[in-house]
Structure formats: C-alpha cells, structure tokens
Image (cartoon, helix red, strand yellow):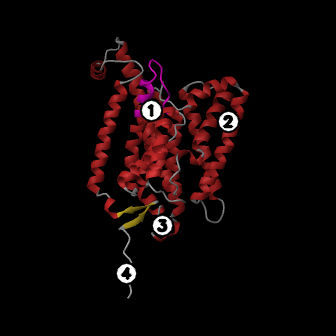
C-alpha cells in the first residue's frame, strides 16, 4: 500500500525567508500600519523638540512654537537649536532608512547597509582632506566635501563591480565596496595620524551627531534627499523583480543593469547627503529595513515607505536618549544608535531565519 506523506505546512518562499501564507499582509493592514507609524513619528518629533539637555517646561515649548518671543532664552533654544536639529534628524533618518532598504534589495544581501558601496568611507576621506588641505572647519564646509567623496567612491565601486562579462552583480558590488572601504579607511587613518589638529576637528564629525546642525545644513542636503528619496520609492517594483534573481528579472522584461544602476544612484544621493549632514551613523540603514520587512512582508513597494518613516523614529528617539541621559551634556546619536541597534538586530536575526546569498 502506498502511503502519502503529509504535506508540509502551507508556506511559500518570498525574499530571503520562508514565510507562512497566513502572514501575508493585506493592503488595508499595511496602510493602517503605515498610518500608525506616521502617528508614532509625529509623537517622537514632538518629544524631540520638547526634551533636551536643558529642561524646558512643556508649556513653554508650545508657547515657543506658536507665540515666539526672541527675547526669551528658552524660546530661542526651541526655535534656533531644537527645531533645526529635529529637521536634520528627520531628513537623515529617512535617507538612511530608504538607502538601507534599497541597498539590501540591490545586493540581495540581508546584511547590507548604506556603507557597503564605500559611500561612508569616501565621505570621511574627503572631509579629512577638506580639513587637512583646505582648512575647512565648519559643518557647511563639511557637507560638500562629504557629498563629493560619497559620489566619487560610489562611481569607483560601480565601475569595479561592472568589470567582467556579467556586469555589476550583487556579489561583485559588495566585494568592490568592501575593498574600497578598507583602502579609503587606511588613507584616512594615515592623514589623521600625521596631523593631530585634523584629528581633533574630524572626530566630532565622525562620531555621528545632530548637535549644532543649522537650517542651512538642512537646506543644503534636502534637495539631494528629496531626489534620492523619490528615486528610491519609484524603484520598489524594480527591487521586487531583482529579488527574484537576474535571470527571472530579465524574463519579466527588466533591464537588470539599468535597474541596478538607477537604484544604486538613489543610494548614493541618500547616503551621501545623510553622511554629509550628520556624519557616518550606523545600524539605522541596517536594522530598520528588517523591521519594515517583518511588518509588511517582502514587497518593496511597502518596505520602502515603512523604512522612510521608521528610521527617523529610531534616529530621533536615540537622539532624545543621548540628550537626556547625560544632562547637562549629551551622548552623540551615532553612539546611541549603535547601542540600541546592535542588540535589537542580533535578536531579530536570531528570531527570523535569513537566507544566505
């Protein structure tokens, strides 16, 4: 007698993991979750303006927002320091979240983050060169050097990854990015060891911070983040096709090289602008897309907007913690995101089975 083996539990392979069919989210549930995330972001925004290294009564904060009096010191702190800082945090957080999600889709690597293309290393090197060679000493000066370095590094990585018959494959891009990052980091370290004064200026930018960011900084990086963000959101369908593999994407009519170049260009704009504005900040672009994917499933048309909303929540929340725990001083946001993000990411990886490349 032939016995039939019991079928395995209903499941289908999507993205990097095997997910039960019952967990596939409906459009209305995803939309409701995105709306709830926007409400959470609004609350974190308000908290970012209300709380800081200096205690200001909440009523005074509200009064500063709607009845600004330039003669009052607390009003000046809210308007001149906290609101610009909050604005930069929103822009940088959204940029890093989108860049991380796109980078993971382009490389098909669940451990990819915006720095995998050497963007952060290129920005850091050019900032050091700006300080050491040209005597740049202001945040407004750092912005343009950092963005130029991010652009040059990304172009070099894409050129190296495109060599060979198969073009720019995810593995070659990742290897080229890792090699260039190590090379640029060694040059940066050599310059810093030569000149102590450059090291003193650079270390305050390199730790990753929102402190002292002015409206001018936000205005300079906002156009790049807006263009890069639009490109990233548009690339959702492209990333869905690329996640199935190059051969399947081609069979669906996708121009794989062009799609990958378009998506990578959005990463350059987003990461370059974010790094220029706040310095290299880790774990935001790595962790948040996984949280978004856990909520929405593998569809990048939803992962991308969720990442754009949840990443500022993490960044601004970390910034609030850094300002509150060390009053009257503060701990830089780059340190807090690493402390908060690393154990959370370890827990996420342990609970969710991620496939290898």
| CB contact under 8 Å: marks 1 and 3 | no
Q: Earlier in the sequence, mark 1 or mark 3?
A: 1
For marks 3 and 2, give the CA distance: 39 Å
Which quadrant of the view contains residue 2? Answer: bottom left
For marks 2 and 1, give the CA distance: 28 Å
Q: Residue 219 bears which disc, if any?
A: 1
Mark 2 or mark 1, whichever is nearer to me: 2
Residue 193 visible here: yes
For disc 2, the marked residue is 188
For disc 3, the marked residue is 249
For marks 2 and 4, give the CA distance: 64 Å
Q: Is residue 103 left or right of residue 302?
A: right
Mark 4 or mark 3, whichever is nearer to me: 4
For marks 4 and 3, give the CA distance: 36 Å
Q: Residues within 10 Å of mark 3 (few under 14, many from 20)?
A: some
Helix, strand, or loop for circle 1? helix
Q: Residue 4 bears which disc, if any?
A: 4
Magenta-tinted stretch:
317-333
Q: Position of residue 91 (x, y in %)?
A: 43, 37
Helix, strand, or loop for circle 2? helix
Q: Judge by depth and name the residue closer to the eye, 23 or 270.
A: 23
């Amino acid at each position: 007698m032939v016995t039939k083996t019991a079928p395995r539990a209903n499941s289908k392979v999507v993205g990097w993991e095997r997910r039960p069919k019952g967990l596939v989210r409906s459009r209305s549930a995803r939309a409701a979750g995105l709306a709830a995330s926007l409400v959470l972001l609004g609350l974190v925004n308000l908290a970012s303006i209300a709380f800081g290294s200096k205690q200001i009564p909440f009523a005074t904060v509200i009064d500063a927002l709607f009845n600004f009096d330039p003669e009052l010191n607390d009003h000046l702190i809210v308007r001149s320091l906290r609101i610009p800082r909050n604005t930069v945090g929103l822009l940088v957080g959204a940029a890093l979240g989108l860049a991380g999600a796109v980078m993971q889709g382009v490389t098909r690597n669940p451990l990819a983050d915006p720095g995998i293309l050497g963007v952060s290393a290129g920005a850091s090197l050019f900032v050091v060169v700006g300080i050491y060679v040209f005597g740049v000493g202001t945040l407004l000066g750092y912005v343009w050097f950092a963005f130029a370095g991010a652009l040059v590094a990304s172009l070099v990585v894409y050129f190296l990854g495109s060599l060979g018959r198969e073009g720019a494959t995810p593995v070659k891009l990742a290897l080229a990015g890792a090699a260039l990052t190590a090379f640029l980091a060694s040059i940066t370290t050599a310059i810093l060891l030569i000149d102590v004064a450059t090291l003193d200026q650079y270390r305050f930018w390199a730790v990753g911070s929102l402190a002292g960011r002015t409206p001018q900084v936000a205005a300079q990086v906002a156009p790049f983040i807006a263009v890069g963000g639009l490109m990233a959101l548009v690339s959702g369908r492209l990333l869905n096709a690329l996640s199935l593999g190059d051969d399947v994407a081609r069979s669906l009519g996708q121009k794989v090289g062009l799609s990958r170049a378009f998506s990578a260009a959005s990463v350059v704009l987003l990461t370059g602008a974010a790094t220029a504005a706040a310095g290299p900040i880790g774990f935001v672009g790595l962790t948040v897309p996984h949280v978004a994917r856990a909520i929405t499933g593998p569809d990048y048309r939803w992962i991308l907007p969720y990442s754009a909303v949840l990443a500022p929540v993490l960044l601004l929340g970390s910034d609030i913690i850094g300002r509150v725990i060390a009053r009257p001083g503060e701990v830089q946001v780059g340190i807090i995101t690493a402390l908060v993000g690393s154990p959370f990411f370890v827990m996420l990886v342990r609970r969710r089975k991620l496939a290898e490349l």
